[in-house]
Amino acid sequence: MNKTLSEVIADILIHNGAVIEKKDDGCLEFLATETLADKLGLPDYGRLRFGYNDSSGDAISATYDSELFKAMAKLLKGKGEFSVASFESSCPNTGKLLKNLNETIVLNNAAFRLEKSETKEISYLLCYFKYTAISDEKREGIAQVLINELNLSAIPFEDGLPGLEDSGEGSAGIERQDIETVFRSSYSAGVEMVKERLKDFVRSLERRLNRDIRRVHEYYEILKNEAGIAIEKKTASTGDRRVREEEIERQLKKKINAIETECKWKVQDLITKYSLNIQIEPLSIIRIETQSPVLWINIRRRLASRSFPVTYNPLIKELDALPCELCFNPKKPYFICDNKLHIICSTCFKICPDCGKQYCGACHINGCPKCGNKIKSGRK
Ligand SMILES: [Zn+2]
Ligand SMILES: [Zn+2]
Ligand SMILES: [Zn+2]
């Protein structure tokens, strides 16, 4: 499923006007326009290599830490913030879509009905993020997020770039959320998608952490026993039994306190060592404008209702799933919150561990509203 670095770089270069040919040795041969070559500090023609120690002669390095890779982020500048392309869609008939609507939209605590359907100009952002996940080891890669700018539905987009037409500045008047909201949502989705992609790595980190903590505890248990024996020996010459026992207890208490403090620090060190820090940064963003059927649904929860656009995604030829308005990488089924009628996925519709109340994570970012319980590390 995951695309290789060379495939992603080929996509981005082709989209920016280069001609690419894949060679048998894994290199990419490129022919770049003058503007592109200038931006990336490349010659007009050459070869790119993706391995660290291969002997591809004069090929230019395109690994994650290469100059070229860093320069790719510059493609975001220049043409406004990103490049705009249009996608010629073939819209399916609305009757079929309506049939799929009930399968796509599963709300656990609310009802919905179709209000109206229309064909509309819509747009998506295809965001290429470079991710770096650092723990005791480092993992790097590229995550591609396709996000709908009207309703913020996001998916990991692993397919190749569809046939896009460069459309310059793009067309005015397309209804969409403001770019900051869209980008923040795609970023959140990107981080969640990377966590999912690295779940084996995360599991292995947890396994190693638990193993090491167990070892540390075993080690300090032994230390405590040894300390007891040593103190007994040291006080052996004390005459009075009661005085001796009091002295043993005093010394032992002091020693055990010191050992336990040290043990706590060691465990804390291990938690830091194995904690996973994920950073993502945008590498390239393409806005894709297209035309598509939009099904406006009316979501009803108790006495309140909310109108929401469900979109057909011509790039994947399916209806877009509903977004989760907290994590943007939803796990079905969905819930609708009481206050603001947020659409929230089952992971983000939290149950407070203390009082058992279920609440909306988008309304209450700081934790359970009933017991004011602060959630330390945000979403789990
Ligand atoms: Zn969620
Ligand atoms: Zn609570
Ligand atoms: Zn809410």
Image: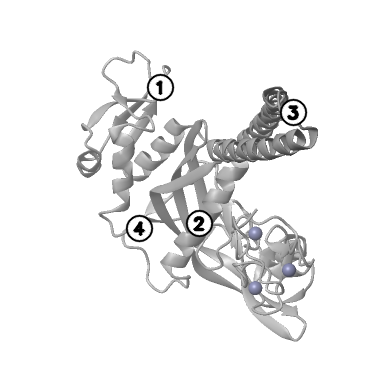
The local crowd at label 1, few if under 14, some if 14 to 19, many if 20 or more residues have their Cα within 10 Å, is: some
Q: Amino acid at mark 1?
A: Gly
First in residue order: circle 2 vs circle 1: 1
Judged by depth in the image, the label closer to the viewer, 2 or 3, is 3
Q: According to the image, label 4 marks what residue?
A: 167
Of marks 2 and 3, which one's residue comes earlier in the chain? 2
User: Badge 3 is on which residue?
Assistant: 239
Q: Position of residue 216 (x, y in %)?
A: 65, 30
The residue nearer to you, when weighing 24 against 142, is 142
Question: Does the CB distance between marks 2 and 3 fall below 8 Å?
Answer: no
Q: Nearer the viewer, mark 4 or mark 1?
A: 1
Q: Amino acid at mark 4?
A: Ser
Distance from the alpha carbon under mark 4 to that under mark 1: 35 Å
Q: Amino acid at mark 2?
A: Ser
Q: SS class of the residue under badge 2?
A: helix
Query: Which of marks 4 and 2 precedes in the sequence?
Result: 4
Please indicate whether residue 209 sits to the left or right of residue 236 in the image.
left
Residue located at (53% from left, 56% from top): 188
Q: Mark 3 or mark 4: which comes first in sequence?
A: 4
The amino acid marked with disc number 3 is Gly
Q: How is the image coloured?
A: one colour
Q: Disc 2 to disc 3, how far (Cα)? A: 75 Å
Q: Say which residue label 1 marks.
A: 51
Tag 2 residue: 186
